[in-house]
Amino acid sequence: MQAENDSLTVMLEAPDDFAGFRQAARVLLALGAAPEVVHWRWTDELSTQAEDGDLFADAGAADAGAAHAAAAGAWVADAPARVITPDALDRLTIAPGQPVHIRKPQLAVLRHACCHRNPGRFMLCYRWLWRLQCMPSLAGDALDADWREIERLARAVGREIHKMHAFVRFRPAQDEKGAPLHVAWFEPEHHIVRAASGFFRERFSNMRWAILTPGCSVLWDQECLQWGPGATQAQAPGPDAGEALWLAYYQSTFNPARLKEQAMLREMPRRYWKNLPETQLISGLVAGARSRTGLMLAAQPAAQRA
């Protein structure tokens, strides 16, 4: 097989399958597969939204679907564009070559970049690795156009992970057996649920929780993370008495003298507001803060104002 003369389609297991990308890239670089002949696709077994029933009841079926996709990823003999999985690539006999070495911080940047929603993210990362193999000094070039774009994607993903950690709001609910389960709804801009879930596993390890998103859902059963299909907001629980208490606390601790609207919007962009219970108070609190601040200034003696 001459990889450089074939059009290759690498089938990854998920939109954020960095492990599969890394596995495939290592082999493709050894084969000498140029970036322009490699196409990256992924199966998205969990992206179909579950309309009803238990979101996690078919987790085994999803695993079976992924295994079926991997089995179907063998070389297609008569197809002009051959489809292969990272596991199938690993089984190919290749001559030993010079491996590509990158630093751990660069590896972390690549991992984040591959979680971006940009459809060309895997192609971009592979092209940079290909060029790095041909020119090792590229590893230290912070101004390289490809690397700067990779960093831009990674920064956006890092910000989104931070926002997910900050803006997920759990509400008490029950599972199909009546056991307590805290459920949250979140709408990420990028494919970050897997990358961000470790934070919640460590912080809320002593309770059972689930995070529902349009792309996929994750359940922590106090032993392991289970993955399910995407959900809709209607499948998440509604407000409860505890949320009313939180809103009362939020309103009582709001300090109008310290209000900085632009800073608030930078930290809490408006696209997250629809899923945060406290944001229903913000408009009224901001309007009240302006009038309260004006009254406080007006009450000061003229000499103090000067």
Image: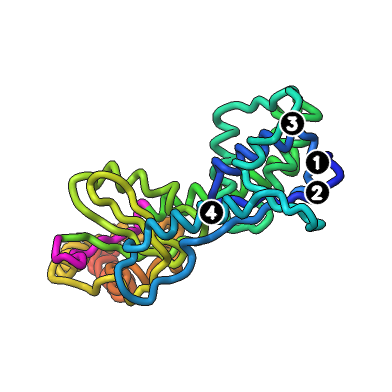
Residue 18 is situated, as x and y percent measured from the top left of the image, at 56, 44
Q: Residues within 10 Å of mark 4 (few under 14, many from 20)?
A: some
Q: Secondary structure at mark 4?
A: loop
Disc 3/disc 4 C-alpha distance (Å) = 24 Å
Q: Which residue is mark 1?
A: 3
Q: Is residue 89 above or below residue 179?
A: above
Q: Is residue 120 left or right of residue 269?
A: right
Residue visible at 54% across and 45% down?
112
Dots 2 and 1: beta carbons under 8 Å? yes
Q: Secondary structure at mark 1?
A: helix
- Over which residues does the magenta segment extend? 165-179
Disc 1/disc 4 C-alpha distance (Å) = 24 Å
Please tell me which of labels 1 and 3 falls first in the chain: 1
Query: Can you tell which mark lies on residue 14?
Result: 4
Name the mark nearer the viewer: 1 or 4.
Answer: 1
Please tell me which of labels 3 and 4 falls first in the chain: 4
Q: Is residue 73 left or right of residue 282?
A: right
Identity, as a three-letter code, of the amino acid under mark 4:
Ala
Disc 4/disc 2 C-alpha distance (Å) = 21 Å
Identity, as a three-letter code, of the amino acid under mark 2:
Val
- Image quadrant occupied by the N terminus: top right
Q: Which residue is mark 2?
A: 37
Q: Which residue is mark 3?
A: 30
